[in-house]
Image (cartoon, rainbow, N blue to C red):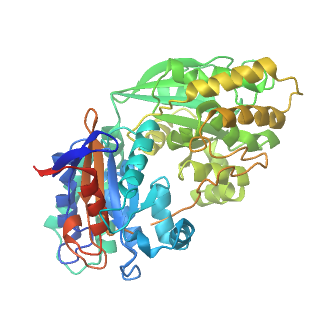
Amino acid sequence: MISGTNKTFNISLRIVDTPGLFDIDIPFAKRALEIQRSVAICSGPHAFLIVISPENDMTVYDTFTDTIGMMRLMFGDCVFDSTIIVFSHGQNFVCDKDFYRFWTEKTELAQLVSQCGHRIVRVENVEESEDQEDNIMKKVNEMSLNGIAEYRFPSIEIHSKALQDHLDNYNGGSCVRTQILEVERKLDTNKNVIALNKMRNETKIILIGKSGNGKSSTGNTLLGGRAFVADRDLNAVTEKCEMKTGNFMTHKLSVVDTPGLFDTAKSLAERALEIQKAVTICPGPHAFLLVFSGANRMTEEEKFTIDLMRVIFGEKVFDNTIIVFTRGSEFSSDADFTEFWEKNVVIKKLVEQCNGRILKIENINGNRDEACWDILNAIQSPHVYKYQYLNIHKNALEKHLKNYNGKRDIHKELEDVVGRLASELNKDIWKVGLVAGGTLLVTGAVVSTVGIPAAVGMIGTEVGAYDVVAGIAGVAGVAGGIYRVAGVAQAAWGSIKGWVRYKTD
């Protein structure tokens, strides 16, 4: 580990190098356990860097897909919330468009990039390049501004044990993919233990959705009683945000029920401002459950769900959002459920926004444990929702409420609010206009799915300092850490050296 100071950002850094991720001479579990030690050396890192070289043969292994599996087994699914993809040898690409075309055309690579929230940069293989270190640090700062805190994974010991058990019983000869699957099977047997161990002392959940979809019933299921009014009487709908607390097993749950997202008794701005209060009475929620019903037809207005969520809570709300379908028995099987939502344009788009987090539950007596486990297993991110521009959204809604004289039409009302937000927010923060209303991609936001590594690193901070664990190198059998791997991760290491006046710890 080395430490130093980034001059541009005037911030302390700690950087940890790690062994090669694809060193085929060493069993996967042995490599993984050594790489996993990086978070003991550098506790609470703020970012992992997966460093890739375009000069390596990317067809030798299913490297991108295996990278996702390896990272998940070493550090848990939450690691991708803190991961940035860094391409070395950036000069191999003529321009940004050429670079974008390169990684989007490789399906598995695109899946890895998507898994990492589309955080991807390219750097030059020269230390004199002025902007490369800034590009990486900007990504780290963006994660911090969007509420991504230090990486923490309470279940890491369970993963370490599964890796050690595999290593103790490994007889050799298996490919990386087979070894990954064997460790995954060991972890699957402890699914509920993992979910329970990864829970915080308190898990905060906010329920969002149309009246009648089962928001309140879902809250009651989570809390194990009749905490919220959940009658089918249309007059008995939630009018104000209300928080209740309860316990599941030995853990505290705080759940907020909110007014219906599309209730027409009030204007759009009135509804939005009331729903926004949820994060005031329950600050730092771990998850927003966006509730739909498997028994109800979707209405025309529900195509504006993404727009409403963005207007109320900002672009990054989807990093903490899980789509939940109540009345799950309406679907004959998981395959039937998947077929249903994949054919629905609105839901499919939402699933993409929420990075694939969608599930079905039954809010019936005797089914609480299964429903709770399913939901808690989906809450994998260690960071809470935090959005520094929330007051700008509130002000835009209040100005709309005061000044809008148009007709009560969700499309027109949203257009007005979105216009106000676009004038107040930087284009890097507010990237698109109406998703459902036809005003797409105002600034060209990147949307795709992707995957491969040449090296992996981590960046973290401690009270004003960034800790960087730079490492997990190795593609196509290349062994060694970042600064030892010529042509693989050398560019990233050169960039990191440009950040710091370093000393070896």
Residue 214, given in percent of the width and then of the height, sits at 65, 32
Residue 143 visible in image? yes
Asked if 138 appears above or below 232 in the picture, the reply is below
The answer to which of 421 and 277 lies nearer the viewer is 421
| Residue at left offset 75%, top offset 31% | 262
Q: Locate residue 216 relative to residue 270 in the image: left or right.
A: left
- How many numbered discs? 0
Any part of residue 231 in sight: no
The residue lying at 23 percent from left, 77 percent from top is 24
Residue toward you, 312 or 222: 312
- Residue 216 drawn above or below residue 443: above
Residue 171 is left or right of residue 271, and the answer is left
Return the x and y of residue 261 as percentages of the image width and height.
70, 30
Q: Residue at x 45, y 37 (%)?
A: 145
Q: Where residue 479 appears, x then y in whole percent?
A: 21, 74
Q: Choose top left, top right, bottom left or bottom right for residue 301.
A: top right
Query: For this view, does 248 lie left or right of residue 444?
Result: left
The residue at the point 35 percent across, 49 percent down is 191
- Taking depth in this image into account, of 279 and 162 the one nearest to the observer is 279
Residue 441 location (% of width, % of height): 68, 52
Q: Residue furthest left?
A: 505
Q: Is residue 79 left or right of residue 445?
A: left
